[in-house]
Image: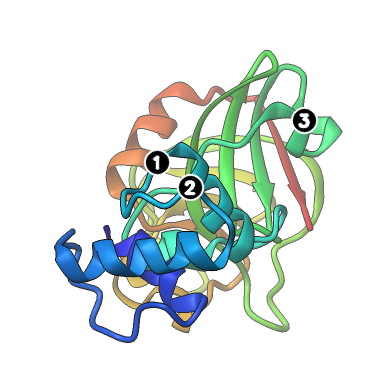
């Protein structure tokens, strides 16, 4: 419900707090949206209403802030929407534009998670790499910060869990690593990824 409320808010139809509750007021706002944007009027968020609302509040290939700030995981993208280098083999496909990491196996996107990248002067390198080493737990030699479930792909840059990302979100940034905020997701990914698997980072 919070995602729905945020998307309605982006169209000027939800000036209230994001409660996550579907009540009478939210139903009326959905009805107002349907009237305004020529969708069959029911006051219920059906498939057509949701598709229209999402199309009006999200530009494909960009960061879906409404979904992120609603506390939801990113949608698993279609293969066609990913970089061509991600379409074969076993790939951690890292898209800076959508701020996501998608795990792809033999042309089938398996899961997607929010990702955070390097700050200015410490940019996450772009290109095609491979996983060179993995550590279930390691501390950065340079910054002395924990890097659980690290999967290194370019020198000292790795995909890993970040408690800082989980706590502060995009208000902060990494020193070049691909940070993941969802502990359960990155832990599961760590045990699927093998040394030598491909990593593609692009914008």
Work out whether residue 40 or residue 132 is closer to the camera in this orientation and state it: 40
Q: Measuring from the top left, give residue 86's x and y in whole percent.
A: 75, 31
Work out whether residue 111 or residue 191 is closer to the camera in this orientation and state it: 111
- Crowd band around label 1 with a 10 angstrom C-alpha radius: few (<14), some (14–19), many (20+): few
Residue for point 39% across, 48% down: 73
In which image quadrant can residue 167 be found?
A: bottom left
Q: Measuring from the top left, give residue 90's x and y in whole percent.
A: 65, 21
- How many angstroms separate mark 2 from mark 3 (CA)? 31 Å
Q: Earlier in the sequence, mark 2 or mark 3?
A: 2
Q: Earlier in the sequence, mark 2 or mark 1?
A: 2
- Is label 2 in a helix, a strand or a loop? loop
Q: Earlier in the sequence, mark 3 or mark 1?
A: 1
Asked whether disc 2 touches disc 1, contact meaning CB atoms under 8 Å apart, the reply is yes
Q: Is residue 140 visible?
A: no
- Crowd band around label 2 with a 10 angstrom C-alpha radius: few (<14), some (14–19), many (20+): few
Q: Measuring from the top left, give residue 153's x and y in whole percent.
A: 66, 44
In which image quadrant can residue 93 be found?
A: top right
Residue under label 3, please give it.
80
Please identify, in this view, whether the residue under mark 2 or under mark 3 is nearer the observer. 2
Q: Measuring from the top left, give residue 169's x and y in whole percent.
A: 40, 73
- How many angstroms separate mark 2 from mark 1 (CA)? 9 Å
Residue under label 2, please give it.
40
Q: Is residue 110 visible?
A: yes
Relative to 129, does residue 182 appear above or below in the rendering? below
Relative to 187, does residue 165 appear above or below in the rendering? below
Residue for point 68% across, 76% down: 122
Quarter of the image with the N terminus is: bottom left
Residue for point 58% across, 38% down: 102
- Is label 3 in a helix, a strand or a loop? helix
Residue under label 1, please give it.
46
- How many angstroms separate mark 3 from mark 1 (CA)? 26 Å
């Amino acid at each position: 419900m919070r995602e729905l409320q945020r998307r309605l808010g982006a169209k000027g139809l939800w000036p209230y707090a994001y409660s996550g509750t579907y009540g009478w007021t939210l139903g009326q706002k959905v009805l107002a949206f349907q009237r305004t944007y020529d969708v069959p009027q029911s006051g219920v968020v059906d498939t057509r209403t949701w598709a229209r609302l999402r199309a009006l509040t999200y530009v494909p290939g960009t960061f879906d802030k409404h979904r992120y700030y609603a506390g939801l995981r990113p949608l698993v993208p279609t293969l066609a929407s990913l970089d061509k280098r991600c379409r074969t083999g076993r790939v951690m496909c890292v898209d800076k534009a959508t701020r996501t990491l998608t795990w792809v196996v033999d042309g089938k996107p398996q899961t997607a998670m929010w990702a955070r990248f390097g700050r200015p002067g410490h940019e996450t390198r772009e290109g095609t790499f491979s996983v060179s080493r993995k550590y279930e737990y390691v501390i950065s030699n340079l910054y002395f910060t924990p890097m659980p479930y690290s999967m290194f792909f370019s020198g000292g840059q790795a995909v890993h869990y970040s408690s800082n990302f989980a706590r502060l979100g995009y208000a902060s940034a990494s020193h070049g690593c691909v940070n993941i905020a969802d502990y359960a997701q990155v832990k599961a990914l760590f045990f699927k990824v093998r040394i030598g698997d491909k990593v593609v980072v692009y914008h």
